[in-house]
Image (cartoon, grey):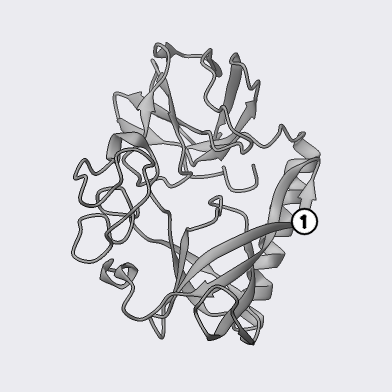
Amino acid sequence: MPTTRDAVFSRVSVDHLVGGGSRVSWELQKTFTDATPHTFQLQVGNTGVADADDWSDTGAAVVDTFYATDSSQRVYGKRLTTHYRVKLTTSGGTYYSKVVATYGLLSQRDWLIAKSIVRKELLRHEKKASPNGFFLKRKWREAATVVDHNVVDPLTGDVIKTINTPGKGTSKTGGYYDPVAMFMDLSPETHNIKSDQQGRGTIDDVRITGRAIAFPQLNAKDVWVDATSDKRYFVHSVQHAAEIRGVPIIVNVELRPAAFNDPVYEVTIS
């Protein structure tokens, strides 16, 4: 993936099989000089956020090699939400690779092209003065489920209470993972004033479109926060604007502003 290069890992790649048997391979930077043995542990998560708390080891650790295999099937719906990273332990310390998704396997040439697209997109955001902001990834894993049935319907799993709950308006404790910096090129607001047929009277649906890099993965109900105004927007829909061999690089998103009394404003942006 275009963003896998860091101070230790030169590149991390995923050859993904939905039914299991996904192979994750890696290359270390030529400047990395920690003495062997190098112990690698493959880790799996679903958020794509490095600081999330849903990372877990998969398979046994491997020593002085360049790949590991995940034999488990991770997804059963229609979206590829599985992400991987590699934990490296040496006598000099412990290191983590950047996160990689399972959209597809890019060749070296395609990977370099994708990196160039991302670099130009970041330059475009800087030149156009796109608002700087933060991405809040919504929690959805069952391990974080609020068990209070006054908050969540035990039969449907729907949130029935949002005010003064530990889920910040969601069914999961904390509601969202720690914020991640993210540029968003926003369009002017569009107001759609109409008469609602479901008893709400005249309504003003405000819609905003944005353009962003596809890392980390954006999904409906995630949140983007304007760093200057602190206005918060729910992601309503996501459309891939640029792909390389099926791997999304740039996305267009439709945003809906959160009401100022929405519990999402209780989430602290440090």
Give the left or right position of residue 264, taking residue 125 as reference: left
**Side of 93 where 192 appears, left or right:** right
Could you tell me which secondary element the residue under label 1 belongs to?
strand
Determine whether 193 is above or below 119 in the image.
below
Q: Can residue 243 be seen at all in this image of the molecule?
A: yes
Residue in front for this viewpoint, 204 or 84: 204
Residue depicted at 20% across the width and 51% down the height:
150
Q: Residues within 10 Å of mark 1 (few under 14, many from 20)?
A: some
Up-down relation of residue 14 to residue 63 (above or below) = below
Amino acid type at mark 1: Ala
Q: Quadrant of residue 104?
A: top right
Quadrant of res 250: bottom right
Residue 177: % across, % down = 34, 52
Position of 20 relative to 244 (above/below): above
Quadrant of the image containing the N terminus: top right
Q: Nearer the viewer, residue 254 or 214?
A: 254
**Residue 191 seen in the figure:** no
Residue lying at 35% horizontally and 81% vertically, measured from the top left: 260
Q: Give the residue at x 57% y 52%.
A: 215
The image shows residue 137 at horizontal and vertical percentages of 43, 54
How many numbered discs, if any? Answer: 1
Residue at the (31%, 40%) spot, across then down: 53
Q: Which residue bears the numbered disc 1?
A: 242
Q: Quadrant of the C terminus?
A: bottom left
Front in this rendered view, residue 119 or 30: 119
Q: Is residue 255 left or right of residue 228?
A: right
Question: Residue 145's x, y, as percent?
Answer: 28, 41
